[in-house]
């Protein structure tokens, strides 16, 4: 091969590498935006669930039981602002308390029970969307060339958010009142 042919080949390879880097940086930016939007949606649903649990405990303590109402209010407050900083643990405690509520919840408006059930479902969906975005971002960041070229810069690796978000008839929604 002639020197001009080598130069043309090296130029083409550099151009391909530059195109790949540009595409990867764009994809990485979009994935990180997706992670951020998914976290905002998840956080919104988690805050809504905690707010509904507080409302249930505050306005209808007789329906859930006086002692359980105090626990529910405390778990909801901790889920909003975890004392120990472990949001997953706080959300798991709130979810467990909501699942253990009595099935009939006499005196609680149907709209509140339905909101609690719907929010529980939306928490599960939002968590899945968030974790999918985190998985995709981490997979792209783990590729050899992306790591070698340090395309992620100094941005932290996004973390999965793992909670038990089963909705086993949370707050008695969907069950007929006796």
Image (tube, grey):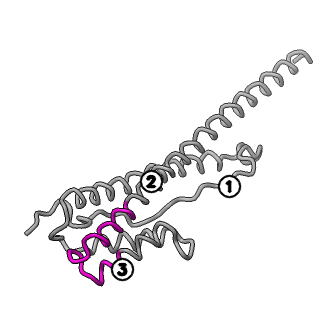
Judging by the rendered image, the residue that carries numbered circle 1 is 156
The image position of residue 55, as x and y in percent, is 32, 66
Instruction: Tell me the magenta residue range.
Output: 49-72
Q: Is residue 68 above or below residue 55?
A: below
Of residues 32 and 90, the one drawn nearer to the viewer in this rendering: 90
Would you say 126 lies left or right of 134 here?
Answer: left
Q: Which mark is residue 92?
A: none
Residue ID at (75%, 29%) = 18
Q: Secondary structure at mark 1?
A: loop
C-alpha distance separating marks 3 and 2? 22 Å
Judging by the rendered image, the residue that carries numbered circle 3 is 71
Main secondary-structure element of the magenta-colored stretch: helix
Residue ID at (18%, 59%) = 110
Q: Secondary structure at mark 3?
A: helix
C-alpha distance separating marks 3 and 1? 35 Å
10 Å crowding of disc 2: few (<14), some (14-19), many (20+): some
Of residues 124 and 136, the one drawn nearer to the viewer in this rendering: 124
10 Å crowding of disc 1: few (<14), some (14-19), many (20+): few
The image position of residue 50, as x and y in percent, is 39, 64
The image position of residue 47, as x and y in percent, is 43, 59
Would you say 74 lies left or right of 111 here?
Answer: right
């Amino acid at each position: 091969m002639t020197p001009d042919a080598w130069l043309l080949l090296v130029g083409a390879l550099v151009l391909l590498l530059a195109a790949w880097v540009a595409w990867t940086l764009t994809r990485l930016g979009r994935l990180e935006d997706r992670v951020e939007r998914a976290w905002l949606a998840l956080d919104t649903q988690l805050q809504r669930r905690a707010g509904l649990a507080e409302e249930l405990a505050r306005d209808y303590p007789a329906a859930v039981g006086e002692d359980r109402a105090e626990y529910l209010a405390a778990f909801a407050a901790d889920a909003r602002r975890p004392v120990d900083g472990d949001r997953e643990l706080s959300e798991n405690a709130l979810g467990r308390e909501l699942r253990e509520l009595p099935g009939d919840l006499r005196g609680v408006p149907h709209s509140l029970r339905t909101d609690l059930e719907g929010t529980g479902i939306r928490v599960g969906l939002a968590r899945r969307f968030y974790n999918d975005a985190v998985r995709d971002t981490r997979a792209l960041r783990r590729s050899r060339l992306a790591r070698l070229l340090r395309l992620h810069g100094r941005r932290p690796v996004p973390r999965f958010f793992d909670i038990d978000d089963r909705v086993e008839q949370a707050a008695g929604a969907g069950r007929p009142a006796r």
